[in-house]
Amino acid sequence: MKPSTLERIYPSLGEDYSRPGILLILRVILSAALLGVFYFAKLAEDINFILIVTAAIICGYDIVLGMVKNIRDRVFMSENLTVTIAVILSFAISRGAEGVMALLLLQLSYMVRAYALHRTRAMICEGIEPERKTLKGLDTVEKGESQNQEYPIGSSLVVYEGMSVPVDCVIKEGSGTVNLSFITGSDKKVSLTKGDYLPAGSVCEEGQFVAEAAQLPENALYRKMASILKSGYGEMTENETVWRKRTAYFVPAAIIISLVSLLVLPLIFNISFSETIRRIITVIAVASPCGVIISIPMTYFAGMAAGRNAGILYTHATALESAAAVKAVVFNKPGTLTDRNYLLKEIKTDRMDSTTFLKVAAYAAAKSNHYLAKAILNAFDENVDTAIVEEFIEYPDKGVAVSVEGINILLGTSEFLHENGVEMPSGSTNEGTTLHMSVSGRYAGFIAFNEAIKQDAYTGYFKNLANSDVDRIVMISGDSREKDRQVATELGIDEYYAECSTEEKILRLAEIKERIEKKSTLAFVGDCECGEKLYEAADVGIMIGGVACGEELSKTDVVIMQDGIGLIPSVIRLARRTKHFVVRGAIFVCGIKFILLALAVMGYVPLWFGLLIDFSAALAVLLACTGVYLRDSSE
């Protein structure tokens, strides 16, 4: 599910924080000093009036300008507007000192709030960029030269034990274990060997690698993750939209309360007109809903950061929101429940020997990135001259058609060969994962592959997922029915769909979505090999194995950096906990406002005290947002 494009009425978290300028600090100090002189110096009334007006102008001219801008932009719920009205009314009833206090409190609240946003954001983001140590490169003559060496794409470097990788690399030689905790959220050491992806910031724990730079430092995987996280709340979530609509009634309600008070208090309760205006001023001043509106995006950001530290990347806040309502999870079997590192199990052919058959299949698969093609090339384990491979056409979910030195070859499913006019002999179909091949229009045989179930799919995993309040667990695959039946039975999955093309998988997802509760969502779990259309067909697309995905990170809603499904329950639980914080924080701030409004009408809350409590409540909720981050990061 992609985020909406509604416009937020308050600046988003994507804007940079800038510390308050020295001029603003001096203005606040000077205004406070003038207010102190007003209260403690025994001066003439005219001089006191000049002091208060001067203090108000010095402290609040930019607030008035902000109010004008808000009105021009048709934003009528800002604190600038409500406090400016309150200050004007304060001066009208000869309570200008309270008006200056209100301006001082607003300026201080803006500075404290901005700093709190900045510090909270900085604290959350500090953990996403690892300390980097430079490596020694093969291109360096003197070891000391590698200290500030740059590594262009394609350059070689050596990774020694205890060293950190400066750029994203692909391992060319060697093997060993590395620490990827800053990306995966797990302290478990990861074993890597030739062909594996080695992200920048990885620390070599054991062994030694010769690697080739695959990305420039600015395009490192952890930098992409940081960029996604920092800009992930660019659009408005449904929760924010709902609370925005609810709080839109605050200012009109405050105006109605003020008008009713203006009539009722003097006439029925015999309260003076000036006292009534004083109470109305407080009602208007605390009516702005900005405290609620600011806390919601910050809470989602904290939830996204908590996920990041656990190895879960929510690419936008609406993904976090949608994940909280997941009731059905559909697993694309290859790569999630079973390992895509297939091994050749059997070659059956009547037209040539097995070695020749494998060689022909390797040339047919040479230009394909499909995981079964890679399995064939790994089994062949010889160089393939791709220059003689011509007219290569790949048909998704079906197979490939190529011409090798003028000989036409088809390699794919039995249906693919049948569609292309190849006569399939009886008994040629094999239950399980197979690829069939034809040469010059005649059937040549098939290759069968072994399929290993991933370890994290065992040990009661699906029971744990069901305990996360997931009602339906489904497996979907393009493999044979018998093979999928075996896998589903072994894992205890009751609902599965086999022999599905991409289009059929999309239709199945739509059918499942229609059979779950209206406000619930469906999650689709796949890996880098899954097409973007599958992720878009689900409410929440979850991609595993993010370390190897690189450029694919932003094509889905949630990315699990580990190559496994163990964190799927955490994706859902963290999203629900974040939603709980959002609702609880919004209710708390609104509750404080309602109490302040009632006490203000009854005359128990002066303007400065009402604003102080209101701003403090909003700040408390803002700081409480870090509870989502700190709590989940420590689990």
Image (cartoon, helix red, strand yellow):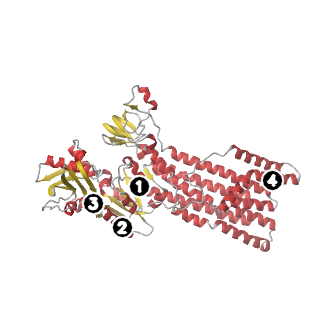
Between the C-alphas of marks 1 and 3, the distance is 22 Å
Which residue is identified by label 3? 478
What residue is pinned by disc 1?
A: 555
**Residue at the disc numbered 2:** 512
Q: Alpha-carbon distance for marks 1 and 2? A: 22 Å
User: In this figure, what is the number of numbered marks?
Assistant: 4
Contact check, label 4 and label 2, Cβ < 8 Å = no
10 Å crowding of disc 1: few (<14), some (14-19), many (20+):
some
Q: Earlier in the sequence, mark 1 or mark 4?
A: 4
x then y, percent, for residue 300: 52, 55
Give the amino acid type for the residue marked by disc 2 in the picture.
Answer: Ile
Mark 4: few/some/many CA within 10 Å (<14, 14-19, 20+): many
Q: Quadrant of residue 286?
A: bottom right
Q: Residues within 10 Å of mark 3 (few under 14, many from 20)?
A: many
Residue of label 4: 52
Q: Earlier in the sequence, mark 3 or mark 2?
A: 3
